[in-house]
Amino acid sequence: MTPAHSRFPAKSRWLALVVIAVLVLGFVAIYAVQAYGRYQARTTGASAAAITGQLAAADRIIFRNTALGEGYGQVASVALAEPSGPRQLSQQACDRVDATSTYLSCLRTKRGIPTTFHATVFNAQQQPVEQHPLSGVPSRTRITDGGLVATTAFVTGHSYAAGQFSTETTIRSVGGPDYGNLEDFSMDIQGEPLTAIDRNVWGVSFISEKEFYATVASGNQTWLAKGDLDSRSLVSVASNAECPSVSPDGSKMAYKKRRAQPGLAHWDIAVLDLETRKETVIGLEHGFDDQLEWLDEGTLLFGMPRAGAPGDSDVFSIKAQANATPQLFIEHAWSPSVVRAAQ
């Protein structure tokens, strides 16, 4: 019997492959053009939020502006004393942002053919001081006063609720060492080394210029782990914890805690007292998927997509105590960071 592949000459097979490749590239180009068109539609016209001029360099909240119209996607700020007041817009467009009084970390999707992803650090004068490419869709970032910056990107997938995804989380210092991918650090999970090929790390929260907390995941399990840059190590301290955030005084840790239920992923808020190890869980009716930010020692901030408004979101506040309920804090906002004026 004649082998099946011999009935199709090599030239015909190559032609078929070329046709398939052209069709795939065509679909990719159409998707990119449509995505760019949707983005352009969000950024034109009058803004849905009140915009003001330059704010004084006082205590403020910096965030991604998601109000449709002028300034959509740009970094914005409001006075800490008046979060619902007019916002100032910068010239930086970011998908995810974190800031201190000295630096701002901006993760951005640059739409085009092909679409690319970048991380840029700006100084207090809003001038770029460092930039590097990201391996995928921006997800999380944190930066310190000293310029230690962590970034997380989705290499595959685009949501922590999905069953299959892969992240790349790196830490580097502005003008200093690059500590590389945290998956290359040694991992001690509940007293045993973790070497599984499916391990992931995301959601860094710095304790100092050398130590941090992060999420470590493998086999559908997650752990809160403490990291050390000098020893290049991660050691677990709690289970079922994601996207940690250390309180301003360093005494507490807030994070996402996945609810044990079938179906779609649902995360509540948990707050861990790092001295007593007491965990307080704050149940959320609708859940959330964000890295928490501390407004003060007793209040947390987080973002939530706005129902029925693709691309828009709001920032909510919630007391770090049992039975607390979220309160709308900043409309049309995402990725908040609290910045206090340099002393």
Image (cartoon, rainbow, N blue to C red):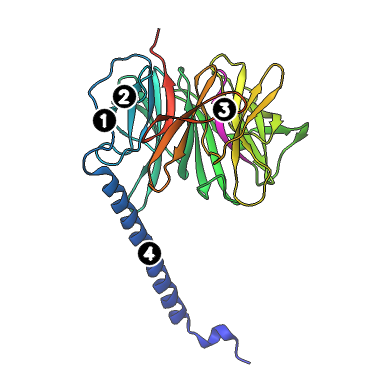
What segment is highlighted magenta in the picture? 200-208
Q: Residue 155 in the image: state x and y as whole percent.
A: 51, 47
The structure residue drawn at horizontal position 44% and vertical position 81%, both measured from the top left corner, is: 12
Q: Residue furthest right?
A: 191
Residue denoted by label 1: 50
Q: Which labelled disc corresponds to residue 324?
A: 3
Q: Disc 1 marks which amino acid?
A: Ala
- State if disc 1 and disc 2 touch (CB < 8 Å): yes
- State if disc 4 and disc 3 touch (CB < 8 Å): no
Residue denoted by label 4: 27
Q: Disc 3 marks which amino acid?
A: Ala
Which badge, 3 or 1, is on the more N-terminal residue? Answer: 1
Q: Is residue 343 above or below residue 251?
A: above
Q: Residue furthest bottom?
A: 1
- State if disc 2 and disc 3 touch (CB < 8 Å): no
Which badge, 4 or 2, is on the more N-terminal residue? Answer: 4
Q: Disc 2 marks which amino acid?
A: Gly
